[in-house]
Amino acid sequence: MPPTVRNADVSISVAERLAPGEAPDQAVAREKRRHHRQTALRVLCIVPPIALLGALVVYPLANAVYLSFTKSSFINPDPDWAGLANYQAILTSDTFLTVLKNSLIWTVAVVAAQFVLGLASAILLSQKFKGRLVLRSMVILPWIMPGVIAGVLWKLLYDPYLGPVNAVAGGLGLVDGNPAWLGQASTALAAVIIAAIWKGFPLSTIMYMASYQGVPNELREAARSDGANAWQVFLHVTLPAMAPTIRTTVLLTTVWTFNYFDLVYVMTAGGPGTSTEIFPTYIYREAFQNVRYGVAGAYGVISVVLLSIFTVVYLRQLNKSGGLD
Amino acid sequence: MASVSYRGAERLYPGGDRPAVADLNLEVEDGEFMVLVGPSGCGKSTSLRMLAGLEEVTGGRILIGDHDVTDVPPKERDIAMVFQNYALYPHMNVADNMAFALKLAGVGKEERMARVREAAKLLDLEPYLERKPKALSGGQRQRVAMGRAIVRHPQVFCMDEPLSNLDAKLRVSTRTQIAALQQRLGITTLYVTHDQVEAMTMGDRVAVMKDGVLQQVDSPLRLYERPTNVFVAGFIGSPAMNLLSAKPGDGGVVIDNHLLPVDRATASKIDGDVTVGIRPEAWRMVSESEGGLPVRVTVVEELGADAYVYGQCDLDGVPGQVVIRAAAGRVPHKGETVHVTSDPDRVHVFDGGSGRRLST
């Protein structure tokens, strides 16, 4: 747009706000100065948050991506440029497939079980019975417990000789001898998954409980007089009304579970072998035990990409079925 | 279609000392529009919900036609309910909301859609069938709730204050629409409201309740002309009937030295103090020498054709405010004192203790 036209526009807009004795072009200049001052102030206000975000998010992220293109080792910890060598090595390795498979099984099993358990417990705890309040406060305990402590606790539970798991299972005649649930590759992942389900389901319980109680009773009554039985009321009225909460909770628990580290690390540290190795534990092993920052960085980038793809696909799917509201 | 009978029906909440609905006996005829009305907490909604199966019946029976439904679950009662907040399923569009009951009943898709379209046409909802409830106005939502009930062709409609969330103007127009619709469909309807104007304008008959007890069931006009007790007299009519305390006197009743004539048959039944009810339009303005009650005018509501005159009368037994309907051209001014009396056939006399009607 030519500047003269712009000036004309401004002069029209300020024409009614002339100071006494002021010519129109003086007023235009005054308005321009005011505009510049405002812009400067806005820039000044935006700088601190951008600097903070840059230091806390962009720099570490960029550095991790950079590291993933480098090579380093215990002997030679300074990173040397290696191009795509790390990615090439990872994507063709068996370990990567194991980590990927473990991560998928781990995430899907934990999230699915937490959904079912959370929903069931939420509905039970929403019924009226004696001791409901006590039970409601108790159910949150696993969630507020630090992951490290939960890990130690479950290690004790699974202990082959002293643990109550074997004591109960042996007493019922379900197992022979003293199986080491965390010590054998065939059972370790399942054992850790069970602990993680226990540790995390109370969050789902609380979310679903709030949501369940937020469904207006009138809706259920309407469905009942429309001819629905209890199961149909739940399926056609209660569950759809809870859907926004369920979608959000499943997304959150998926991201958290995929990135969950401390419980697995304390219980098995990824072992035996690589049988319980998931992305976070394996990244930790590569970075801080094998001192291969480059490989760890590449695994990190891959896990972020996987999670991003999942989130985008999930949100797309959501928008198709009504979004988060 | 069917009749509805409450036979001594009772609802006692656990831990309650008094039933929410006590010994309710009410016969609703096939195709009748019955309105349950009363102040909040009178048990009218509970009575309706007992019929719908949403509230347990702790005593007595409820019949739909010849079928005892007291212990039958709601889904087997063939009743359609319209709720105060409409209770539309938020995740379903209008068509699915209306078709839901039919779907549950296993009605085929084509017939479902045909019935939904038919109801939508009746209710001017055709352009909105694909919309979700949240994209509708209050009036449209109300009509969807009606539509959901209509498509089912149920035996009985239960409506629980379906107009109370609409604005005043829409409420008046919807009121007539519902009454006309009910007449056209001929489906037995129980309609709960706290608004006595709604009750009077919509119902074939009106059941007035108070504290869980049915007070009177009658046609609107009978309720207005022959209220069975002081409560019904004061509840039905707007502005409300003037209720005055009086003592028996010679040829009438005496309000603080002023004689109000009542007919002989009624006078013979008077035994002790009474409550006298006079509708605003039953007052007659007289000159001071004729001995009417003196009323000092405080507010005048001009309605055009006539006017409501509110005033104070400082006699013993007269409530704080007296309402008089005055014909246009004869409306007194604010501050003026008028004298009013009534005629024997327009005075309702109730027993001072029990509140029961004494007038014939």
Image: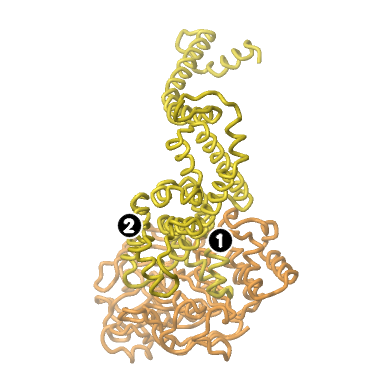
Q: Would residue B330 be seen by someone viewing this image from the given angle?
A: no
Chain to which the residue tagged by mark 2 belongs: B
Rendered view: A22 above or below A106: above
The structure residue drawn at horizontal position 31% and vertical position 79%, both measured from the top left corner, is B15
Q: CA distance from mark 2 to mark 1?
A: 63 Å
**Residue with the mark numbered 1:** A240
Picture coordinates of residue B236, whole percent (x, y): 44, 74
Quarter of the rendering occupied by the N terminus of chain B: bottom right
Residue type at mark 1?
Answer: Pro
**Residue with the mark numbered 2:** B335
Q: Pointer 1: residues within 10 angstroms few (<14), some, or many (20+)?
A: some
Chain to which the residue tagged by mark 1 belongs: A
Picture coordinates of residue A211, whole percent (x, y): 46, 58
Q: Nearer the viewer, residue A300 or A56?
A: A300
Residue type at mark 2?
Answer: Gly
As drawn, is A280 to the left or to the right of B132? left
Quarter residue B255 falls in: bottom left
Q: Which numbered marker is on residue B55? A: none
| Tint of chain B | orange
Quarter of the rendering occupied by the C terminus of chain B: bottom left
